[in-house]
Image (cartoon, rainbow, N blue to C red):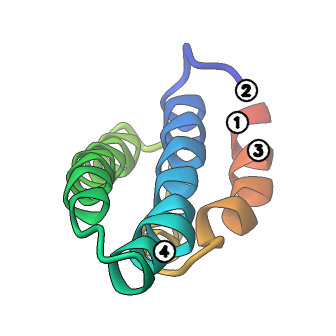
Amino acid sequence: MKVSTSIGRVRLAGFIEGVSYITLLGIAMPLKYYADKPEYVRINGMIHGVLFIILCLLILIALIEGKLSFKWAVLAFIATLIPFGTFVIDRKLAFFDKQ
């Protein structure tokens, strides 16, 4: 993963955002409802929200720079909304990163 390229930055941010999403859904949400610990959702939710916005901005930058087509920018955005989606689309983004 080349962080020096705009696609590499999207891939890195996608990985981090994906981990935060899985943590939010898999750890913080069950703790909120089963252990009565809503503070975990507040903390993890805020972190995930910031990472989500950063990822969306990086996708937009890659689109503006011409590194991603409009189709793939939309697919990358949709992948951010689905659990494990950023991990699935990372394989295709890796192909764009090699070009």
Residue sitting nearer the eye, 29 or 54: 29
Query: Would you name the residue on which mark 4 appears?
Result: 25
Type of amino acid at the residue the image marks with label 3: Ala
Query: Would you name the residue on which mark 2 appears?
Result: 1
Q: Nearer the viewer, mark 1 or mark 2?
A: 2
Residue sitting nearer the eye, 92 or 31: 31
Query: Would you name the residue on which mark 1 appears?
Result: 97
Determine whether, in the image, residue 43 is placed left or right of residue 86: left
Determine whether, in the image, residue 3 is placed left or right of residue 35: right
Q: Are marks 4 and 1 in contact (CB under 8 Å)?
A: no
Query: Would you name the residue on which mark 3 appears?
Result: 94
Residue lying farthest to the front in this orientation: 35
Type of amino acid at the residue the image marks with label 1: Asp
Type of amino acid at the residue the image marks with label 4: Leu
Disc 4: CA contacts within 10 A as few (<14), some (14-19) or many (>=20): some
Q: Are marks 3 and 1 in contact (CB under 8 Å)?
A: yes
Disc 2: CA contacts within 10 A as few (<14), some (14-19) or many (>=20): few
Q: Are marks 3 and 4 in contact (CB under 8 Å)?
A: no
Disc 3: CA contacts within 10 A as few (<14), some (14-19) or many (>=20): some
Q: Residue at x 48, y 74 (%)?
A: 25
Q: Are marks 3 and 2 in contact (CB under 8 Å)?
A: yes
Which of the marked residues, 2 or 4, is nearer the chain's N terminus?
2
Determine whether, in the image, residue 70 is placed left or right of residue 60: right
Q: Looking at the picture, how far across and down is residue 1, in whole percent?
A: 73, 26
Type of amino acid at the residue the image marks with label 2: Met
Quarter holding the C terminus is top right
Q: Nearer the viewer, mark 4 or mark 1?
A: 4
Q: Residue at x 50, y 30 (%)?
A: 9
> What is the CA distance from the residue labelled 3 to the residue labelled 2?
8 Å
